[in-house]
């Protein structure tokens, strides 16, 4: 990649990222508390962590929350949070920074946004981010450990959905996402549909943002928990945060460790996550902050079970998991009608010396400076490094000619370095009598990506039942590199035309520069390498919100997105089309909070079109699809019927299809993309018994419709419905006087022991990943 241009704004910002990496600031929640009448004034105020609630409160209560008391040495108390900021049944008063930089709540954004809070994560027992996604509206996900964070929403999957960490993108989802424990997270944000205005290239299907826990102003609060389940999985966590004895200094520290065992033989993942942040208020006009995080995961991976001919399995053939007929993509044998053999439910076909490892380090820091009334400057610098390794057997293809399973081994490693800066200038003003807020953002980053990978792919054959797993064998390595520089200038604006009607829009101009090289085992450059390519996509959003009556808000938007047409930007080859796709969405809906904040529902309808699409055709092959069309509706509702009873549910319908998808030998026009169900629904209920030791019982049900594992749509992953039940008891403080809250929980996951296919990787179409069977879990949580 050519060197950065001397003296450019990008040089200045990247240089400032180094200088400010030791300086720290947090985005004030004061900016986020928008009232119905007007946008809130810009203030450099101490952060209020809205998740800090009285121990008696529960997610979705819709009740007012008491603010934590302030210690004598704490920073001055922030202004009271407006009543509208109390958590609502659907958490629509949360502020999702991945959805807007304007400090708007979910109800004030003209798009469908969902924020899953830490309290919901805790109560619903979401252990990984895949669990969180499966509880969101219309979202499906792969599962630990082979397909972590492989998300599908609104008809789009993998690198068409941007994954952000505290608002920062590190690369394509299907290459950089890892299994992540939820213990250190404050929230998970879902922004649906094309969203390149906020996060740039790759957001044609939407954005998922993981937000780590941050300091709060007030007395120090500590929490810890432990859990154990019937698969011998164990999780532990400790967190602490609050104001220190140093005036204006607040801290947060979290550490979690887990050992999540898989249901297949010799599979499981160990994770470690340590995160910390300091906020320091220098004066009323200046705040500094800094954060560091280390994450590690080590897996013995599970890559699914092979599709098998019904005729071969005989009495061991299963029904209700998969259906259809299949000709092997790998060995060409005709399997005819296929099934999952019940003898393979717990079989691990991976080699004995397999490993799947990642180590990640984050450094973030910056400042927030009030330049003048209504004018505030925020700057964040960040550095990220990751080392990842896959050393596995990843192909499991049944061969109808030999009645054995073809295996092919695969190795790849990543060494990734990313440094960047995001600077915002927010200006509150009045235009011709109308309140207006404008945020101008400049972002720049440099990324180095080194990818040594296998030059040979050892192959062998094993039996379907009780395979001799063996070892990887001879490995030869070749090298790939990618260097990507990115600069983006964006504007986002909200104009209040009346007290209840606002226009919200924005525009982003982005430059992406890619330099790639690839060498063989001898270190010689391959044909066509090295090569360079650059893109300058322009994307945006325009929409409105109208609060017709207090609590009832209508919205509509037109938004655009862009992403690389062929696989992902890290792996583009000179022989592949190097254009960007374009996508757009029309969306309209309503968000309604009523009954004294005890009930809430939302509805949205959308129409998304993505052009110039390249899709997986098995292995690393790609086919061209002229268009992908996605139309659907989403409905979510939650209500606290009484102080004791809560009900909630959501349902999403999507019709996603390819068009102009013709190639030599056939056409997939009219077919549905892989891993896209038409129907996804969740429902739950809980009842709390207000006894001296309060007890709550709950049930959660999930239904996922039929999906396909390839563009050919010949094999169906059948619909499934599963349910979890839980019971917890809150032990009064009188029992443990030093502990404010003690909760013991018993949970049964997949109570009916349903066998189902949770995901199918279109690059490995000969196999599918099964969902976990029934498991039992106990946990204990403490806060003081």
Image (cartoon, rainbow, N blue to C red):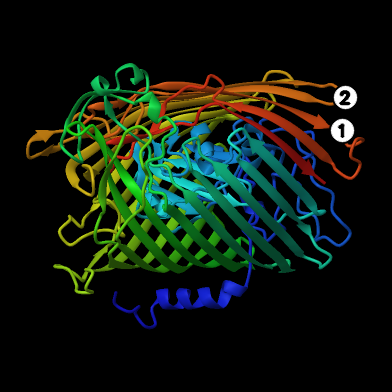
Vertical order, 245 against 678 (above or below): below
Residue 496 in view here: no
Percent across and percent down for residue 444 are: 42, 68
Element under disc 2: loop
Residue farthest left in this picture: 664
Left or right of 630: which side holds 381?
right
Vertical order, 614 against 114 (above or below): below
**What residue is pinned by disc 1?**
732
Residue 599 in view here: yes
Instruction: Looking at the picture, tell me which residue is in the foreground, 509 or 186.
Output: 186
Percent across and percent down for residue 303 are: 38, 42
Residue drawn at x 84%, y 65% as measured from the top left: 245
Residue farthest bottom in this picture: 6
Q: Quadrant of the N terminus?
A: bottom left
Element under disc 1: loop
Mark number displayed over residue 446: none
* Distance Cα–Cα, label 2 vs label 1: 8 Å
The residue carrying pointer 2 sits among few (fewer than 14), some (14 to 19) or many (20 or more) residues within 10 Å by Cα, namely few
Instruction: Looking at the picture, tell me which residue is in the foreground, 765 or 668.
Output: 765
Residue drawn at x 61%, y 26% as measured from the top left: 748
Percent across and percent down for residue 346 are: 44, 33
Instruction: Looking at the picture, tell me which residue is in the foreground, 300 or 632.
Output: 300
The residue carrying pointer 1 sits among few (fewer than 14), some (14 to 19) or many (20 or more) residues within 10 Å by Cα, namely some
**What residue is pinned by disc 2?**
692
Residue drawn at x 59%, y 63% as measured from the top left: 375
Contact (Cβ within 8 Å) of mark 2 with mark 1: yes
């Amino acid at each position: 990649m050519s060197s950065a241009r001397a003296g450019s704004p990008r040089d200045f910002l990247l240089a400032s990222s180094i200088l400010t990496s030791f300086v720290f600031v947090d985005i004030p929640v004061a900016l986020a508390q928008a009232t119905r009448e007007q946008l809130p004034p810009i203030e450099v105020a101490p952060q209020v962590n809205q998740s800090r609630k009285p121990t008696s409160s529960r997610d979705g209560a819709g009740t007012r929350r008491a603010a934590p008391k302030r210690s004598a040495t704490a920073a001055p108390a922030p202004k009271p949070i407006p009543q509208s900021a109390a958590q609502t049944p659907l958490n629509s008063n949360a502020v999702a920074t991945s959805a807007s930089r304007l400090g708007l709540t979910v109800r004030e954004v003209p798009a469908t946004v969902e924020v899953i809070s830490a309290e919901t994560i805790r109560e619903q027992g979401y252990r990984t981010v895949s669990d969180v996604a499966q509880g969101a509206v219309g979202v499906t996900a792969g599962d630990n450990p082979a397909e972590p964070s492989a998300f599908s929403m609104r008809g789009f999957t993998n690198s068409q959905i941007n994954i952000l960490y505290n608002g920062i993108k590190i690369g394509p989802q299907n290459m950089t996402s890892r299994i992540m424990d939820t213990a250190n997270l404050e929230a998970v944000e879902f922004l649906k549909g094309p969203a390149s205005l906020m996060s740039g290239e790759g957001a044609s299907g939407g954005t998922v943002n993981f937000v780590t826990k941050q300091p709060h102003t007030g007395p120090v609060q500590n929490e810890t928990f432990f859990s154990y389940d019937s698969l011998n999985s164990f999780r532990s966590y400790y967190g602490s945060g609050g104001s220190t004895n140093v005036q204006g200094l607040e801290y947060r520290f979290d550490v979690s460790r887990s050992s999540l065992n898989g249901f297949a033989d010799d599979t499981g993942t160990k994770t470690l996550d340590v995160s910390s942040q300091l906020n320091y208020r220098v004066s009323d006009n200046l705040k500094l902050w800094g954060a560091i995080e280390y994450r590690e995961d080590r897996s013995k991976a599970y890559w699914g079970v092979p599709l098998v001919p019904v005729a071969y399995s005989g009495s061991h053939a299963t029904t209700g998991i998969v259906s259809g007929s299949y000709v092997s993509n790998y060995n060409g044998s005709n399997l005819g009608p296929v099934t999952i053999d019940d003898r393979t439910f717990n079989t691990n076909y991976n080699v004995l010396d397999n490993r799947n490892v990642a180590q990640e380090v984050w450094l973030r820091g910056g400042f927030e400076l009030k330049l003048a009334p209504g004018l505030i400057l925020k700057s964040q610098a960040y550095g990220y490094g990751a080392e990842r390794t896959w050393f596995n057997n990843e192909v499991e293809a049944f061969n109808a000619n030999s009645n054995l399973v073809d295996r092919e081994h695969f190795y790849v490693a990543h060494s990734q370095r990313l440094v960047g800066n995001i600077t915002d200038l927010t200006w509150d003003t009045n235009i011709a009598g109308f309140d207006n807020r404008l945020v101008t953002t400049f972002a720049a980053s440099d990324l180095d990506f080194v990818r040594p990978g296998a030059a040979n792919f050892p192959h062998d054959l094993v039996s379907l039942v009780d395979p001799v797993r063996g070892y990887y064998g001879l490995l030869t390595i070749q090298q790939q590199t990618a260097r990507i520089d990115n600069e983006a200038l964006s504007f986002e604006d909200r104009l209040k035309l009346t007290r209840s009607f606002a226009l919200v829009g924005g525009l982003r101009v982005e430059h992406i520069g890619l330099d790639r090289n690839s060498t063989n085992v001898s270190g010689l450059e391959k044909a066509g390498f090295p090569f360079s390519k650059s893109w300058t996509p322009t994307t945006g959003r325009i929409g409105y919100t109208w609060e017709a009556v207090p609590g009832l808000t209508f919205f509509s938007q037109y938004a655009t997105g862009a992403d690389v047409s062929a696989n992902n930007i890290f792996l583009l080859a000179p022989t592949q089309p190097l254009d960007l796709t374009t996508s757009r969405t029309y969306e309209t809906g309503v968000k309604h909070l009523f009954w004294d904040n005890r009930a809430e529902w939302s509805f949205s309808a959308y129409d998304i079109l993505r052009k110039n699409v390249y899709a997986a055709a098995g292995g690393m092959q790609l086919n061209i699809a002229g268009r992908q069309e996605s139309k659907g509706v989403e409905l979510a509702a939650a209500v606290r019927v009484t102080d004791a009873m809560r009900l909630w549910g959501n349902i999403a319908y999507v019709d996603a299809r390819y068009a102009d998808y013709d190639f030599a030998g056939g056409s997939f026009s009219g077919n549905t993309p892989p891993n896209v169900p038409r129907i996804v629904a969740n429902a739950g209920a809980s009842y709390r018994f207000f006894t001296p030791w309060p007890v709550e019982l709950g049930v959660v049900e999930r239904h996922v419709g039929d999906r396909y594992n390839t563009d050919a749509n010949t094999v169906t992953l059948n619909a499934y419905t599963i349910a979890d039940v839980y019971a917890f008891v809150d032990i009064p403080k009188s029992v443990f006087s030093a502990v404010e809250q003690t909760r013991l929980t018993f949970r049964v996951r997949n109570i009916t022991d349903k066998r189902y296919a949770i995901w199918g990787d279109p690059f490995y179409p000969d196999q599918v990943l099964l969902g976990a069977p029934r498991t039992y879990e106990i946990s204990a949580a403490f806060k003081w």
